[in-house]
Image (cartoon, grey):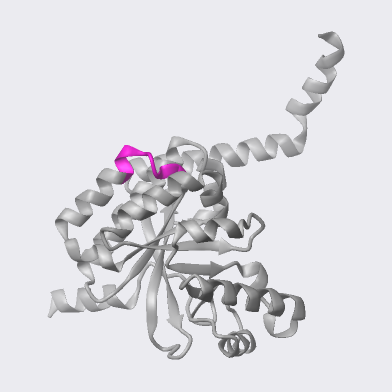
Amino acid sequence: MRANQPEIFQTLNDPLSVAVAERDSNAIELVRSGLAENRCMLAYQPIVQTRAPDRPAFYEGLIRVMDRTGRIIPARDFIDQVEMTELGRQIDCKALELGLDALHRAPGIRLSINMSARSIGYKQWKKTLMRGLRRDPTVAERLILEITERSAMVVPDIVQAFMSELQDLGISFALDDFGAGYTAFRYLRDFYFDILKIDAEFIRGIHKNPDNQALTRALVSLAGHFDMFTVAEAVETAADAEYLATIGIDCMQGYYFGVPTVRPAWLADERAARSA
């Protein structure tokens, strides 16, 4: 016991460990208070058609939490800390609720919403979905659920059954961050994802990276074999967009085409219509 005490003491007082623990605690409190005080919102980023980049094919709704000072905090600053907890399930429910409401208010858009495979068995998530579908049955065919490759591969059988059930209702599915390091190609035969989103790691700077060019062409070919639409993530330059168009990417997403915004054009149109 005594021999271990110095090591334990050092771990508890290690500056990096203390900083990580404080960061995690702050992130958890941010999400908890944001949910309790209704300070959550979606930021919308367009996913454009490669052949007609001025026309969004759909938008991705990205969850945001506003802190008490009014700063809007992106999911990357808290999602890893809450993913394994019930707060992760609650933030998935809130994202879905906000997305369904946006689809109801804007009948001309399609919208993708992120979720973790861990939320599949969470009763409140399913209740949120069914409540939204009862309110407006048209949203089903305009809703896309994004599940990361990492999350899907943890429980493939559960994800497969879940997708089959909801696809029967008209909901589509996107496999997010494909190629990020957890790839199990054999599962693609069973999943029947509608959309394959190719991870940013392969896309940034692709016009000058022969290795990523070869890998991305292979992923595009694979998606075609399984009748999935392809989306290139993190397209940030004209040169990358031009190259991706030459290899048959169906859609592109990234700062080159539009940053995530909590004030999308259709909300401005809606406000103008109400004030007219």
Tag count: 0
Q: Is residue 60 visible?
A: yes
Q: Quadrant of the C terminus?
A: bottom left
Q: Quadrant of the N terminus?
A: top right
Q: From this view, report whether residue 233 is shown above or below residue 49.
A: above
Q: Which residue is at a point 55% across and 50% down the rendered structure image? A: 153
The quarter of the displayed image where residue 126 is located: top left
Extreme residue in the right direction = 3
In the image, which residues are magenta? 118-125
Q: Is residue 78 visible?
A: no
Q: From this view, report whether residue 139 is shown above or below residue 216.
A: above
- Residue 122 within the magenta-colored segment of the rendering: yes
- What x and y, as percent, mark residue 224? 52, 76
Specify whether 48 is left or right of 130. right
Q: Of 240 and 15, which appears nearest the observer? A: 240
The quarter of the displayed image where residue 275 is located: bottom left
Specify whether 265 is left or right of 256. left
- What x and y, as percent, mark residue 127? 25, 44
- What x and y, as percent, mark residue 158? 44, 44
Extreme residue in the left direction = 276
Q: Which residue is at a point 73% across and 26% down the rendered structure image? A: 12
Q: From this view, report whether residue 137 is shown above or below residue 235.
A: above
Specify whether 220 is left or right of 91. right
Q: Which residue is at a point 68% across and 39% down the rendered structure image? A: 19
Q: Main secondary structure of the magenta part?
A: helix
Specify whether 96 is left or right of 149. left
Q: From this view, report whether residue 26 is shown above or below residue 168.
A: above
Q: Of 255 and 134, which appears nearest the observer? A: 134
Q: Of 244 and 32, which appears nearest the observer? A: 244
- Residue 71 within the magenta-colored segment of the rendering: no
